[in-house]
Amino acid sequence: MIDTSRSTGAGKHRRRRAIRAAAVAVVVGLTGSACLAEPGAGRNRGAEDDVVEVMYGFSGDQSQSFQDIVQPWADQNGIKVKLSSTPDFDKLIRSRVAGNNLPDIAIYPQPGITLDIALSGRLIDLNTVVDTNRYNKNNMYLFDAASDAAGKVWAIPMSTSVKSLVWYPKKAFQAKGYTVPKTHQELLALTDRIKADGTPPWCVGIESQAATGWPATDWVEDYVLRFGGVEKYRQWTSHQIPFNAPVVQQALDEIGKIWFTEGNVFGGRQAITSNAFATAGNPMFENPPNCFLHRQASFMAQPGSFPDRIVEAIDEEAGVFPLPPIEAGAGQPVLGAGDLAGLFNDNPDTVRVLEFITSKEFGNQMAPKGGFTSPWKDFDQSKYPNDTMRDIAKIAYSASEAVFDGSDTMPGEVGSGSFWRGMVAWVTGQKDTATVLKEIDESWPDY
Amino acid sequence: MTAKVMTALISIVAGVGGALVLYYLLNKLAERLPGRWEDRIKPYVYILPAVAAIGLFLIYPAYQTIVYSFANRTSTEWVGLDNYQQLLTSEAFLQTLFNTLLWIVIVPTATVILGLAVAVLADRLRPRGEKLTKTIIFLPMAISMVGAATIWRFVYEARPAGQPQIGLQNAIVTALGFDPVVWLQQERFHLNSFWLMVILIWAQVGFSMVLLSAAVKGVPTETLEAARIDGANERQAFFRVVVPQIWPTVTVVFITVLIGVMKVFDVVYVMTNGNFNTNVIGLEFYNQLFTNGNAGFAAAIVVMLMVAIIPVMIYQVRQFRAQEAGR
Amino acid sequence: MTTVSQGPQPTPVPGPVTDRKTMGGRRRHLAGVGENAGKANWIVKAVLLTICFLWIVPVIGLFITSVREPDAANATGWWTVLKSPLDVTQWTLANYTEVATESNMFRAFINSFAITLPATLIPILIAAFAAYAFTFMQFKGRDVLFIVIVSLLVVPNQVALVPLLQLYGQFGLNGTFPAVWLAHIGFGMPLAIFILRSYMATLPKELIESAKVDGATHFTTFWRLVIPVSVPALASFAIFQFLWVWNDLLVALIFLGPGENEPMTVNLAGLIGQQGQGWQLITAGGFFTMVIPLIVFLSLQRFFIRGMVAGSVKG
């Protein structure tokens, strides 16, 4: 790098090096003191104005409905709000927390992020701001989804969804004389019966581009819940028992019985990882149906998933029953999900906004637009737009045990990473059950 | 709405104008100094804004990244070399490194060759044909990555056998009588990575074509004529006269694409998220930082990237010296 | 590696190109437009046709998908509509109208310009000065600094996001245009300097030297000589920087956020539901956002004519 046109006096050489060394030292000195981040440090600039900023990740129609309800209410009540719908919510909320640019309220699509951010010390424990007589797990479905082992509640549900549902093509199903199974055995029997009648009974699809594998995690969670009960489920999702505990192995084996048996799934085993989850159930609405059963969440019943003509006549075309418990009389366990609202500061206006968006009043306006299930168990069911939504809501509210989607509660490495990938490897037969579970267990971060 | 447009226009003028004024002032300042000092200070004046921008936006974060690579996931405690050790001993990460190597070898080479081919061949077309060709090749660059992902979904998509295919490749395959293939899940010989590389090459050839086309047009025809007079045929003329003269541009393009490929992530992210053994370092970095929230791992990965670039930089240094000597 | 070979030396063309009038007069020596054009034989044409076809087929697929109903797009391949192109029922403009009437699309469009234009023009200016200094001036640490700058190309931009957020937060810059401008200027600088400097290095010393002999200062040389002659490189970089900023989502999302300053990319991304519903809007939206960069590309094409540099420089 020495320019040959310059003189190469040794003095010049040495001086240049000295200058360089000094410069480096200055830089190191200046930044060295600020090199490591302090947990919970820095002022929150977001809290210093009088506008309540609500940051959330849903968009499109849902966001529009949300704004149409919250804005007028805020205007009526003299509160200034800023409603920011943001794509890529989980990446952005992390950046904003790290960059000290916090919103006042954030609506999380998963408790896992909430718990992660709670570690940063910026979240307010909601026990200190809401009335626990009203807001508790007896009154609210999935109330304690975002509470940690110490009992602190970091976020409460604003809207929820039900995941332990099996959809079927109503007309064809009834025409064939099939009945809704009430236990797991009956479900297996129904599977065999449909197969004997000449159609693959199940449609299964877990492809979801970057998130491929997540629908499989829902199946696993449902069965761990059913085989192990709420206690074991909670221990599993909080890593108090290892990921490859026997109950999980049992769940996978059971699912394998349904998925991998020849002729059980439309398209065969190899189609599972390539079928896009949103449209995987559509073959059952063809004439004649190419399958009869599709286990998927309540958000299937909207444009973009089921075909438009089905969505428009959902009550006549599609039926839904809860994924049965293992044994009769054991109550109905339900896996659910939802959007949870949490606070970064506790000034009065912010708290009022939080109380409003988690209230029944809000739900009364949101429900008729469809795609929304209120978390309140005593919600006025007449507000739901069709019978299908009412049935789903009933399933949620009358659940004997309701838990939040496990992969949403686990840390990102697992819940959005190794669990999804492990499922894909397991379905394609690349790795066997024991290996997959062990690898997922090992990927659990220790903090 | 007009207020918005006005604000936008004013912002544009203010931004650009401000920069020009800054330079003018700095330059005038430098000119005021006595001769010898002026010569010494001038270069620094010229590079000052650039270096300041780079210093703030890249050097400072890069430095912080190096520091964080020795700290834990929330950057609150030192962990020494743990991050590196854990990464380099993990099977998954080593696979990721290998995949990235494949990308680095294949994509820049293909991009440069294709770009050069188009630049040279299109040069021989009439102006309108040339413009059309170049626009078509450039088109993929104008489409954002999200749009590109949607496009290629309709090429690679697989439906179960017997169902109508909506992916172009499978439509062709089934028309020929075979079963549909789930392209992006074919791990043997890393074929699926290759299909992803196609997407990146498709998007990047526009870049290499634009730069190489400018370079090819910059070759004075006297040199070509002289070669032809000497009896060279087209191929010899190309390889012996044109290529050496455009070689600096070829290296610029190659290195730029190479570096871009080293940190590629969005192609792989939207198509497979690294599943089916398609993971690459750029995506691993992104996932570690944003999905897992592990700043330590993410930083360690960046440091490894920076180390990996050193051989490329050494080559660049040699290039400069050669250029300097030849001028 | 090899140095730049000069090839066989024809008679030198005297003088730098400071008077534009005579540019046209040098047509004898310059290649001009017609030199190589029209020389394509059928092999060349066939090869180009194949490449162009392969390149454009996916884009056509996207276009056709954007004028179909999403249900249809999910059910059958897009090429099936070509069997009966006149069947009007399979075409729909719903995707486009939905995107266009999306309440804030026009505002987002203006915002995209407000973000992209300064973020394209300013880096070029700054980088041109720096590239000139790196090429034609001598100073301490020149080569080291250049290597460092180019090495920074490998640093993923995401590492800068959190430190910058914190920094901007202190100055209250978050959510404003300057935040994004500065970020793009910083991120685009290494590539700009790399490309411009590499190009300027191919200009011969005689050019600059004769200017110096004529008594020009660095500034004049830069402004009146080097810049006009570097126009192909400047135009190249302008295209890419424009493209990169216009299509950027992450930087805008993090420093501007959704709201009244959001550009088109953020707006479009916000149309997709959490489970991916609304993907058909991306197809239409993709074409919307593609139009402007294409126009920029086409309008900058005239700077790529043969002979900008030839005749005035080489030999």
Image (tube, coloured by chain):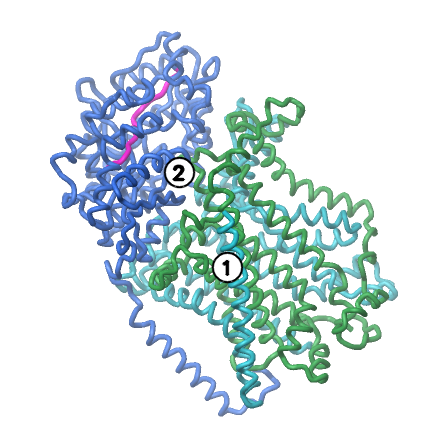
Chain colours: A blue, B cyan, C green
C220 or C206, which is in the foreground? C220
Q: How many marks?
A: 2
Q: Is residue B25 left or right of residue A380?
A: right
Tell me the SS state at disc 1.
helix
Q: Which residue is mark 2?
A: A59
Question: What residue appears at the point 48 percent right and 65 percent down from the top-left corner?
Answer: C152
Indicate whether A113 appears above or below C206. above
Q: Is residue B124 left or right of residue C75?
A: right
Amino acid under label 1?
A: Ser
Let me know if residue A394 is in the magenta part.
no
Which disc, if any, is residue A87? none
Neighbours of disc 1 within 10 Å: few (<14), some (14-19), many (20+): some
For this orientation, the residue located farthest to the left is: A133
What chain does mark 2 sit on?
A: A
Specify the quadrant of the image occupied by residue C67.
Answer: top right
- Magenta residues? A157-169
Q: Is residue A144 left or right of residue C133?
A: left
Q: Which residue is mark 1?
A: B11
Tell me the SS state at disc 2.
loop
| Discs 1 and 2 carry the same chain letter | no
How far from the left and from the top, in percent, is residue B18?
Answer: 52, 67
Question: What residue appears at the point 25 percent right and 44 percent down from the top-left corner?
Answer: A342
